[in-house]
Amino acid sequence: MSVLGEEVTAGLEFPPGFAWGASTAAFQIEGATTVDGRTDSIWDAFCRRPGAVAGGDTGEPAADHYHRFRDDVELMAELGLGVYRFSLAWSRVRPDGGAVNPKGLDFYERLVDALLERGITPWATLYHFDLPQALEERGGWATRDTAYRFAEFASSAAERLGDRVPFWSTLNEPWCSAFLGYAKGIHAPGRQEPRAAVAAAHHLLLAHGLGLAEIRRAADVQAGITLNLYPVRAASDSAADLDAARRVDGLQNRLFLDPVLRGRYPEDLLADLEPFGLGSCVRDGDLALIGAPIDQMGINYYRGYEVTGTLRPGVEPGGLEWVGADGIGFVPDAAASVTHSGWSVQPEGLTETLVRVHREYPAVPLYVTENGAAYDDSVRPDGWIDDVDRVEFLAAHLRAAHAALAQGVDLRGFSYWSLLDNFEWAEGYSKRFGLVHVDYRTQVRTLKRSAHYYADVIRDNAVPVTS
């Protein structure tokens, strides 16, 4: 194996057929927010709220992928990607949550066909945070009806693309949509209403179940959901710390894993969220829909949590997103380096997360659908971006994924977040996660050192033991 021409004496091989990919999301890269019938999503509206997004940034033009997708597909082919995971903009496909917009689906058909022409497998995510604003104005995810509108969206997308797209995720990171959007308010729609957040969590899961049924009706494909999971450990064996960890693990992980893979909510979590109305949201038949068998689960992993129930100097108090978990705090990992986002680099947590799902839940094939890091990339005068921190981050997490395979985890693929630098939600364009640098002024794309490294890994189907 060579990494940018440097010989590496040993590598950890991945199984034959392991799916190497990269991920993006519609609002973060497409731009063209008013083109071909697209209407506002909640993120378009949120970006117009003063102070909501760093720098006053918006989703226009982002990476202008709507107009440059063919060039981007060529970059994917240059890297040797086997899989490209993208999302469909609901406001493009069914503007305002209403009738199908053929021009919106035409775009995704062109993208899918371009991917297939270059031998890249398309993986479609139906919902990546961008609810049509018109549906939010009718209550958004806090309203049960939104789940049924999502099923209509899923049906129209799968009917048009299901003959060419073999992998589907209904939702991406419903935790973020529910708790960052409706409790903490730092994501669209920017509400701080804990009961609405809890209702949103259930209605998102209901949308998954309804959407899954529609996908299966329309096409013979591999369908599932993508969750952002965090290993959670107590700072000590004290009762306060153990209970804090239980609550955080419940809200972050088990609130979604248990209904999807076991067909029920955890009893302790139902008790925790009873004051916020979770039980009253659940109707007969909901959990059967939510718990219908899936073909695969995507796992997005970025870091872990060390949790305490005793606030003290040096501990970061929990925010509004931890509904019902007052008094919890998060202990910084003093031994870990941090990314430009301020997130601790904890590759061992990826192994822990994958092994946990494998051992504690019914068997389902797993894919790492997002893992990546923002760094303050600098462009040298010759145009080279020597993002060695990202190379080291990626190598460490690939080794962690391999360690999970060695422990028997049915891990079938890894997709880096993100293919391109993009609009990073409330951080605007201030954080760069991409393998490919985007000059937002000129839209010129430049492969970073990390892109070349990842291409080497993909070519050899192995990761070097040391970077």
Image (cartoon, helix red, strand yellow):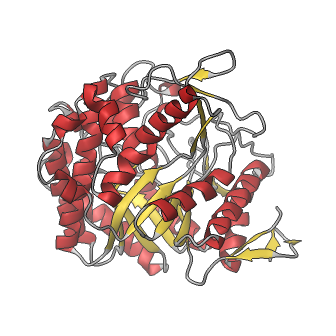
Q: Tell me if 333 is positioned left or right of 318 in this view.
A: right
Q: Nearer the viewer, residue 191 or 330?
A: 330
Q: Tell me if 44 is positioned left or right of 351 in this view.
A: left
Residue most extreme to the bottom: 16
Residue 103 visible, this angle: no
Where residue 406 sits, quadrant-wise, is bottom right
Q: Nearer the viewer, residue 461 or 175?
A: 175
Q: Say which quadrant the C terminus sits in.
A: bottom right
Marker count (numbered): 0
Residue at the (26%, 64%) spot, across then down? 106
Residue 101's place in the image compared with 161, above or below, is above
In the rendered image, residue 304, in percent from the top left (x then y), is placed at: 60, 43
Residue 229's place in the image compared with 211, above or below, is above
Q: Nearer the viewer, residue 158 or 236?
A: 236
Residue 446's place in the image compared with 275, above or below, is below
In the rendered image, residue 242, in percent from the top left (x then y), is placed at: 55, 34
Q: Tell me if 41 is positioned left or right of 372 in this view.
A: left
In the rendered image, residue 174, in percent from the top left (x then y), is placed at: 36, 45
Q: Say which quadrant the N terminus sits in.
A: bottom right
Residue at the (60%, 47%) spot, across then down? 433
Where residue 218 sits, quadrant-wise, is bottom left
Residue 299 visible, this angle: yes
Where residue 110 sits, quadrant-wise, is bottom left
In the rendered image, residue 71, in percent from the top left (x then y), is placed at: 52, 64
